[in-house]
Amino acid sequence: MSVLLFMASDAPFAERCNPHEKLLSINEALALGITDIPDFMLEEGFDRNQPNVILYMDREIEINPQTNEIEDGNFADDFAIFPFLPQEYFGIHTEKPFCANLEWNLYTKDRAENVIAYMREHLQKTEELEIWRVWLDDTQVPVFRKKELLLSELTAEVLQEIAEADLTIEPPVHYCYKIRRA
């Protein structure tokens, strides 16, 4: 099972790729001087021009196995937003027709403020959006904890609250914050 942090809305979400990550072909990776390529990808017969086979990142991510702390450079723009359809995941309990996965390695205040700016722009197209943090598990019925806020009340600390909410309790808890434009 896994954790999913996502937004839901009545309007489609704009995709936002992480500027610190890029998918490359083998030839693109070699042109950048990347040498840590699996041998099978360098063998004859492997299409070196096939797109999206190497993930290139311009920053290091370190995970301390003793503390589970992540260090990733703390770049404020180090996040991505990828639209998906709610039916693509089991356990999505929104009634909104459009969803988008919010991907970041960890919460930082600067990242959260950039996500809020994205939300503010999105809310120019619709009256409200939801932000969810859920444990994808089809074996237990979740408990829902919901909160409603005006966009003017949304802060980096509110995003931290949902991003770091404890999902390990039994039964699983799904958090949903509904953000209204006005």
Image: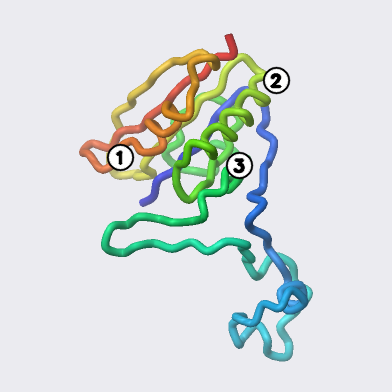
Q: Tell me the distance, in whole angstroms, between the alpha carbons under discs 3 and 1.
A: 22 Å
Amino acid type for the residue under numbered disc 3: Ile
Question: For the C terminus, which image quadrant?
Answer: top right
Q: Is residue 103 above or below residue 11?
A: below
- Res 93 quadrant in image: top left
First along the sequence among labels 2 and 3:
3
- Residue at label 2? 125
173 in relation to 55, above or below? above
Q: How many residues crowd around disc 2 within 10 Å: few (fewer than 14), some, or many (20 or more)?
A: some
Q: CA distance from mark 1 to mark 2?
A: 31 Å
Asked if marks 2 and 3 touch (Cβ < 8 Å), the reply is no
Tell me the CA gap for discs 2 and 3. Answer: 17 Å
Q: Position of residue 166 (x, y in %)?
A: 29, 38
Tell me the SS state at disc 1.
Answer: loop
- Residue 129 position in % (x across, y down): 56, 23
- Residue highlighted by disc 1: 167
Q: Circle 3: is it few (<14), some (14-19), or many (20+) Cα within 10 Å?
A: many
Residue at the image point whose x is 61% and y is 31% from the top? 98
Left or right, 155 with respect to 99, comes to left
Q: Quadrant of residue 40?
A: bottom right
Farthest left residue in view: 170
Residue on which disc 3 sits: 81
Q: Nearer the viewer, residue 42 or 96?
A: 42
* Residue at image location 48% in from the left, 20% down from the top: 178
Measured along the vertical axis of the image, is residue 29 above or below residue 6? below
In terms of image quadrants, where is residue 34?
Answer: bottom right
